[in-house]
Each structure stands twice: as structure tokens, then as C-alpha cells.
Amino acid sequence: MKIVLPGGTGNVGGFLSRALAAAGHEVVVLSRRGGVDLGGGVRSVVWDARTPGPWTAEVDGADAVVNLAGRSVSCRYTEENLREMLESRVDSTRVVGEAVAAASAPPGVWLQMSTATIYAHRHDAPNDEATGIIGGGEPGVPDYWAFSVEIAKRWEEAQREAVTPRTRKVALRTAMVMSPDRGSVFDVLSWMARLGLGGSVAGGRQFVSWIHADDFRRAVEFLLTREDVEGPVNLAAPDPLPQREFGRVLRRAWRMPVGLPATSRMAGIGAFVLRSDTELLLKSRRVVPTRLSEAGFTFDFPRWETAAADLVRAVRGRTGP
């Protein structure tokens, strides 16, 4: 297959593009720094993620588009950063839709990155695609969390409104992707755990949804070929668990016996130092992959214990004990 990957230079896009190329696919990454050598046989083409240009020729005749473009959420949730998150997602999705609609030979499938953040902050029951509660305005949570949900809703809306009758569309409601690569969310969480800072945060009742990078890649390949699946699909392991247990398992994998707890205020200070935001730590994301499982996908890493152990082994193999 020829697969076009807008936004394929980030952490998730990097390992996905390399893996797809290693599997024999022709992979073209759309990047603001086109022409750079991404390695592994991956070709890059420049785009601005807002307007049509010569890059649209790559979409015309491609078999698939997997759009991962969007400003990283690992930042302080200032008004400016939230606006950039929204615009970078909506604008890139809109222009990808325009390129697909204008193509004489449009791709057969368009997988569009989305986020599990679209669901409500809740502890009582898991969210799946049919019964999940879309978030926004939940009592007792910061007002700006609703804006994160609004970003997710408008992100999916931009894909849904694109007029692409010959192209199947799937919105990937993705949980935290755990990869052993430097700079990944697993890298940051591991750094905290190894320093003994990975205890419960604000009581630790909030659920953490996650997916191993290998299962994320396999799920993308699965959805590229399943012509009967379209619309929102949760990309999350079937084992979301409370943050206190999530951290305990991670510390055990790193053989760290100590995990200092943190209050909400302490979490805010830590997030500020890391130039991130407490929503990533405090929002309860309890998401399960019902549609993916019903379509026949099986996870290599359905449980956090085995996933954490595998990821730690991969990091140690790269860096040593």
C-alpha cells in the first residue's frame, strides 16, 4: 500500500511510519520540514497543514491516509496553546479532507487521529463507542477541561463533514500510546517512577487508559484493511486501571519500591516544571475498545503488567541497566 502520513514526525508518527515502511508499505510523511531523511525508507514531503499545495499529489492515487497532525498536548494549557491545539487539528483535518475530495483516485480509507479525552471524566463505568458519555461541563472539574473536549469534538467533526463518498473514514479515539522511545509519555512516567515520584496523585482513583505502541501499530494496520469498520473507534487496551494501581505496576516493573504520593497542588507544581498540565494526570479516562474487539482484533498486550514489563525491557535493552 501507499500510505500518506500527515504529521508523521512526532513520537507516535515516527515509530508508526518506520513500522509501516518495514512491513513493505510505501510511506510518505507530510511535514513542515519536507525533504528531511526520516530513515527506514520513509519519504517526506513539505506541507503547511493548512492549505492545499503540491503535496496533494501524494494523496491522489494513495491507498490510505493516516492523519496524525496536531500540536502536542504535552504543554501548559494556556489560552494560546489551547487555541493552537484546536487550530492545528481542525485546519489539518479540513485540508486533508479537501485533498481527498479533490483526488481523481482518492484513497480507499482515511484514518484520522482523535483522542480518548473526548469522553467524560468518570469513575463509575467505562466509556465505549456506543455507551460512552461525551465530556464537557462535568461537575467538580476545571472549566478548561471542557475546552479539551471541544477540541476533540471539532477535530472529529472536521473529518465527518468532509465530502469523501469513495473514502471510508475512521476516527481513532486514542488513549496514551506507550512506547519505549525517548520523549514518549512512557519515558516521562518512567523517569518519575525511577526517582520514586510515581505514587498516587490526588488519591489515585482516576482511571488511566493506555495502549502499547505495538498494539497501536497493529490496530492501525487492522483498520486499514477492515472495510466494514468506519466512524469512531477506541484505540485503548481493555484494561484501564486506577492511577494508583497503574503507578504501582510501573514501579514494580522498574524495581522501585518507593512511590511518593502527590496532592493536586503538588501535581500542579510538577506539571509546571515539566511544562505540561494536570489534566493529563487528573482526568479519569476509563475507555474500552469495544468496536475494535468486536471486529476481531486481539491485543498482544491487553494488561498493563505485561505491557509495562515489555516496555521496561525495551528501554533497558537500549540504555543498559
Image (cartoon, rainbow, N blue to C red):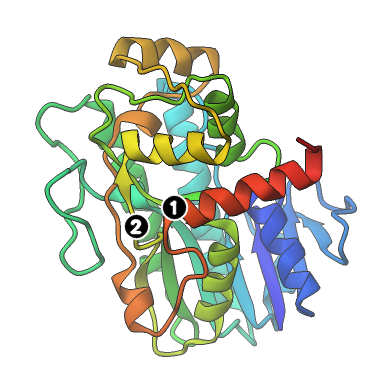
Q: Position of residue 228 (x, y in %)?
A: 40, 89
Q: Position of residue 21 (x, y in %)?
A: 78, 71
Task: Give the residue at x 67% y 61%.
Answer: 16
Q: Which SS class for mark 2? A: loop
Snapshot quadrant of residue 77: top left
Q: Is residue 114 left or right of residue 123?
A: right
Q: Which SS class for mark 1? A: helix
- Residue 235 in view (yes/no): yes
Q: Amino acid at mark 1?
A: Trp
Task: Give the residue at x 44% y 41%.
Answer: 249
- The first of marks 1 and 2 along the sequence is 2
Q: Which quadrant does the C terminus fall into?
A: top right
Reading the image, the residue beneath label 1 is 304
Q: Position of residue 137 (x, y in %)?
A: 14, 36
- The disc at residue 217 is none
Snapshot quadrant of residue 230: bottom left
Q: Are the residues tagged 1 and 2 within 8 Å (C-beta)? A: yes
Please tell me which residue lies in front, 45 or 296: 296
Q: Is 317 rendered above or below residue 231?
A: above
- Residue 8 in view (yes/no): no
Task: Give the residue at x 19% y 41%.
Answer: 136
Q: Amino acid at mark 2?
A: Asp
Q: Is 98 rendered above or below residue 178?
A: below
Reading the image, the residue beneath label 2 is 239
Q: Which quadrant does the N terminus fall into?
A: bottom right
Q: Position of residue 114 (x, y in %)?
A: 43, 56
Please tell me which residue lies in front, 262 or 32: 262
Please tell me which residue lies in front, 120 or 244: 244
Q: Is 63 rendered above or below residue 111?
A: below
